[in-house]
Structures are given as C-alpha cells and as structure tokens.
Amino acid sequence: MRGYVRFLVVGLILGLAIPLLIAAVQEKSPAEEIYRGPMERDEYYMFSSGGQSGGVFVIGLPSGRLFMDLPVFEPRAAYSYAGVGMPEREMLEKTGGLWGDTHHPRLSQTGYKADGKWLYIQDKANTRVGKIDLRTFRTVLVKKAPNIQVWHGIALVPDRQGNTRYVCANGEFEAPVPPRPGLPGGYAEQPIPDVGARVPEDWKSGVVCLYADTLEPAFQVLGTYGNFDIMDWSPSGRWLLSNIYNMERGANIDEMIKAPEDATQFLDVWKAEEALGAGQYTLVNGVKVLDPKAIPGLVYLIPAPRNPHGIHCQRLDPRLYGEAALGKDTVCIAAGKIVPRVNIFDISGERPRLVAQPWVGLGPLHVQYDGRGNFYVSLFVDSQIGAYNIDKAIKFPNEPDRYTVDKIDIHYNVGHLSTVMNYSTPRGDWLLSQNKLTKGLPGFIPTGPLEPEVQELIDIRNITADGQGKMRLVYQFPTPPEPHESDFIEAEKLAPLVWTKYSRPYDPDTRFVGPGESRVVRTGPHSVDVYLTTVRSRYGLDEVRVKQGDTVTLYLSNVERLRDMTHGFALQEYGVHFAIDPGDTKKFTFVTDKPGVYWFYCTWFCSALHMEMRARLIVEPV
Ligand code: RUQ
Ligand code: CUA
Ligand code: CA
C-alpha cells in the first residue's frame, strides 16, 4: 500500500514537472514569436511613413500586418479624407497640394514617454507638417512652415517636464532670407543672381520650430552654412541637433562633396527661449528669427565626416550619441576618400563634445539604439545592418573588431532602420530594416517593373549590454512605397485611447443631424443646406430636391450606435465620394450645375440591405 502511495506521489510530481520543464526549455521559433493567430493582438503599433505615398502606414508589430493606410497629404475617399468639396481638401490645396513626401513620423510625448495623443509627420517637398489625432486616426491639421524650403528633419522638442512643446523642422534647401516678395517663388525683387558653382551668402537654410498644439511658428534660427538634413533632440531637451551637408555652399554635386568635412549643429533651445524673451529677434513674415551670429552660444558647430546624413540621439543616457554618417560619398565613390564613420557626441557638460568616430561600414545612413548600450547602423552600400557597442566604440574607436558586435545581411540597400520605441523608451527587442530596393527578392511574387517594397524584421534580443550576441532576420513583409522611418507605441497603451465612435462636437464647423432631423433648408435664392442622417440601411430622406445652379451644403451624420458601422456616400456626375464613421458629421459643398436625377448610394457594405441603401438627388432645371 505504501509503495503504491509513493508510486502515486512520484508519478504525480513527474506528471506535473516534466511538461513544465519541457515548456521552460522549449524556445519559441521565430515564426511562433511573430505570428499572430486568429484573435491575437500585436504588441506594438508601428507608424511607418509612407514616403512618396504621402501618408502613414499603421502596422502591427511583430506580425507586420498592415492595419491602415492613413492619409495625410493625399486625399483618400474610402477614409473620407479631403474629397472634392470638403474642408480638408482646401487645407491641403492652400498649403501646397494633394500629394506629399512623408519621411519622419513622430509621436507626441508626456513625461518623455509616447502618450498616444498625436502623431506628426512632415511633407518634405511642400515644407509642411500634418497632425493626426490618434483618437480617430484622422489628420486634423496641416500647416506650412514659413521661411524655409523643403522640410527634411523633424524633432518634437519637449519642455523641461518632457512634454512635447515644439515641432521643429530642418529647412534643407537654401533660399534668400528674408524672402523678398514680388517675383516668382516670392523670393526676390532684384534679378535672381546667377548662382554658378556657389550658393550666395545671403541664401540660408536653417531651423524653424512651431508650437506643437497649433502648428503656429514659435521661432526660427537662421542657418549660417550648408544644408540642414536630419535632426533630433538630446535627452535633456536642451539641444537640438542637425546634421549639415554641403558646408561648401556648392550649387551642384561636384562642389558639394569637395570639402573633407561637413558639420553637426547643436542648437541650444533654452538659450533660444531666453533670447526670445529678451527680444533679440527680428520679425520675418511674422516669424521671430534669431541670428546665431548675433547671439553667442546659441549654436555650436562640430566637424563631421563629409556629407553626413542621419543624426539620432540615445534616449536613456545622460550622454548623447549622435551620428553623422557619410552616405552620399560612398554612393559616388569616384568623389573621393570614403570615410564611413559615426560621430559619437557627449553633451553631459556645458558644451557638446565629439568623443569618438568609429568606422562602421560602407554607406552608413541612420543610427538606432537598443537602450542597453548598443547602437545599430544601416549600411546602404554594404546592404547590411551593423550592431556596435557604444562604450567600446568610445574606448577603442580604431579597433572595429572590439566594438562591432555583429553584422547581418539585408535585402537590399537599407535606408532607415527603426528599433522599437527608439525615440521614447527603447525596448531593444525588434529592429526594422526599411529597404530601398528588393531587386527580385526570391520570396516575393513579382508585381511588374516596380517591385514590392520590403521591411525586414530583425530580432536583437540576444545582443547583450556588453556587446555580445547575434541578430537574426525573422521576417520579410511588404509595405506600400516607400518604407521609411517608424515610430512606435505599446498597443496596450494606445488601444484603450482610441474611440469606437465620435463624440460630439468633434469638429465645431459641422452640425450633427440627429435621428428624424433630416431636411432640406433653402437659405437663399441659390443656396440650400441639406441635413441628412445615415443609418442601416437608409439615408434620412429618399429624395433631395434642389434647383439647377444651387450651391448645396450637405451635412451628413452617421447616427449609428453600433461600433464600426461606417457608411459611404457616392454621387456620380458631381465627383462626390466620402465615408462617414459612427457619430461623425461630414460637410461638403457642391454646385448643382447639371440638371437631372442622380442616385447616390452607400459604398461601405453595412448590412444585408446595403444594396438598397440609396436615395435621389433631383436637380430641377431652371
Ligand atoms: S532621410 S534614408 Cu529623408 Cu529619412 Cu534617410
Ligand atoms: Cu450603408 Cu452600405
Ligand atoms: Ca560636403
């Protein structure tokens, strides 16, 4: 009997312990770690800039699933953004047009942490920025930055509590400052000088900071030299870093790559605020412009290897690790000596200081961090990503074997790389390689002469704080053109903040039309307001009767109480198509210049009677 009990007890222990033991030692395969099965949620939201697509892609990580192609500078009817006759369209047209070139998305922060409130992204070409409300994932504001041409680098500079205060811009291309209105481009009243090989001295680039809430200009700091490219802010929020290429002031590529060095600018934001308070500015087009030549200590320039590109700060360290990597030279190798180095700065003291310039590989473009003491560099020419240990790179800057942790091949020609939450609280788990070319990647089915764009997911969890371990490539997923930089936030943090339904009034310019309030109101001999509800599976009126030549302002409200019950509105001949989310009201205006009967209908499949969801616009001839 005793033996039987012992047998039972031992059997029980083994029966419990063995499966537990197996589970503990069994390492998950990469596929298991990134795969999200039915009903399984991703760990992060990744906001990836859409490059020449003009918007932002919302991607779940680590699965790589594309959740939304969020429109910012390009209209998108399916998301009810900037259609003909809508106010958002006017906002885009007034600031530059219906397209954009988005490069660097940034999430707003509270206490130095991504807070899930706002997303900002710049449009390089048209020198403007879009602000996206993350409750609704809708672009709510687009503004042009004054007095600069081409907005490349962006930084959300916080106040001293770590709350986002400014949206700062690097103006990349130099132009006459102050702008002299009068001639094409608004830049000169005298004949525009023949530039020749050198850009004239009074043509400037530089930094403009806008208030993050209103996007109205706060101040500008004139660039005294060269072209301002990428920017970032130091962990204290005091320094705003810009890398500058073309210190030569060359007007063509041969001239731009002549000098052996370019520069990194450190702008003292606190000093700028002091100078503003002391009135040391001049007003140019209503913007308070600070001239660094007149304000000592406002900017410091530190030499960088020639033609630098990315500059990125390390968030979790009192020291700052910037980077100014030579990219362009290595692409045009004929141009001269290849010096692919990364700049490491220390700004724990009163003045920024260069502490090391380690060699990294060919075509370095951008740097990211894992929060454990390592940095990662995209190497465009080598088609690799390198991992390096920061402390060792400072201690042994001439011994790549000691500070290089690992290198991994990517496919191909990486531009940006993004580590998860690099710009807030780096996680050091995943790294995205955002590649410029796929060149017939074997795993991808071809899609014509333009091949699919790819992001590659790299596991960096095995890279240790003392610079040991290997990266591993675990996934390749396509993204519409063109994979660029990303910013991240935890899904569990943002998801609860996202609305399932609009609260009223979201937009003070529109008037919510409640159930039973649909009506046509004549407001003048040639103007009509139409108030219309949508709910499954009908519009509030079966017939909307107006006269030829009327200006019709339509307010369309979705009165659904069910989440995710979006309706559409498509009207042929008048070019109108938009969507309307639960609880929201959309407004648009059009002129009824074509008499006739026009059926409008719902474009979102909303119910079993979706096909029946239509009504008539009758335009009576006069
Ligand atoms: S820049 S590939 Cu416009 Cu982001 Cu470096
Ligand atoms: Cu409403 Cu389909
Ligand atoms: Ca140069």
Image: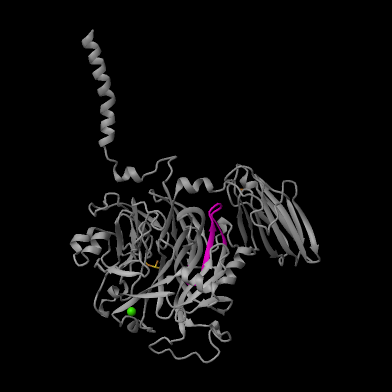
| Bounds of the magenta segment | 123-140
The C terminus - image quarter = bottom right
Q: Can you name the residue that lies furthest to the top here?
A: 1
**Visible in this render: residue 145?**
no
**Left or right, 93 with reference to 68:** right
Q: Identify the residue at horizontal 44%, vertical 70% (top origin).
A: 268
- The image position of residue 162, as x and y in percent, is 47, 58
- The image position of residue 520, as x and y in percent, is 77, 56
Q: Can you name the residue that lies furthest to the right here?
A: 525
**Left or right, 274 with reference to 386:** right
- The image position of residue 454, as x and y in percent, is 36, 58
Q: Is residue 547 magenta?
A: no
Q: Identify the residue at horizontal 42%, vertical 59% (top origin).
A: 480
Q: Nearer the viewer, residue 376 or 557?
A: 376
**Which image quadrant is residue 320 in?**
bottom left
The N terminus - image quarter = top left
| Residue 35 against residue 11 in the figure, above or below | below
- The image quadrant where one finds ligand 3 is bottom left
| Residue 362 against residue 336 in the figure, above or below | above
**Left or right, 162 with reference to 561:** left
Q: Nearer the viewer, residue 302 or 246?
A: 302
**Visible in this render: residue 582?**
yes
Q: Is residue 131 magenta?
A: yes
